[in-house]
Amino acid sequence: MREKDLKCKRDSWQVSSLSLRDAHSCIKLDQIALKGLWSKQQWEKELSDSKRLCIGVFDSSNLIAFCCSWIVIDELHLTAIAVHPLHRRLGLGKVLLSNLFQKASTQSCKRATLEVESSNRAALALYQSCGFITAGCRHNYYKNGSDALIQWRSLGF
């Protein structure tokens, strides 16, 4: 995609907090991008709990990316991030994380953490570019037996 086309695309994106009214869109994108990570009940809890931050990126009225997290005391725990396959590699991950970090810092969060599959090179590159560092490993963490890398980042801007 040419830089001019990419700028036009970015101009049509709208970033907003997600709520229960977005459950259907979240479930649909979850199925496409994450192969159904969460059930309908999990999504309803995620989108209605005040200790969770969920942010979406919309192109027109279509949800094309989301990230979800929990606030635990003064830490932000990322639980899911997804971008529609047709919209990957356009910077949406950074847009989501930047907005999420800003919201979390207004709620007194000092650090952010996540687990990422050790073989997920695209996600690792995104997280590294956003300031995360690997602090440990959870062996056999995922259903397929792969390891999860534990990553941390300060939210001090």
Image (tube, rainbow, N blue to C red):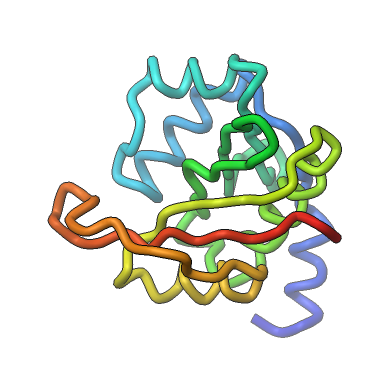
Q: Is residue 50 left or right of residue 126?
A: right
Question: In the rendered image of this protein, does residue 6 appear above or below residue 39?
Answer: below
The mark tally for this picture is 0
Q: Residue at x 63, y 34 (%)?
A: 54
Picture residue at 68% right of the left edge, 63% below the top: 94
* Quadrant of res 109: top right
Q: Position of residue 29 (x, y in %)?
A: 46, 41
Near-viewer residue (77 or 18) = 77
Q: Quadrant of the N terminus?
A: bottom right
**Quadrant in which the C terminus appears:** bottom right
Spot occupied by residue 142 in the image (x, y as percentages of width and height)? 22, 50
In this image, 84 relative to 13: left or right? left
Q: Residue at x 74, y 73 (%)?
A: 6
Picture coordinates of residue 50, whole percent (x, y): 66, 17
Closest to the observer, 104 or 68 = 104
Q: Is residue 120 left or right of residue 23?
A: left
Viewer-proximal residue, 66 or 4? 66
Towards the viewer: 101 or 42: 101
Please state the horizontal and vertical placement of residue 127, each as a whole percent of the image.
56, 67
Q: Residue at x 57, y 37 (%)?
A: 69
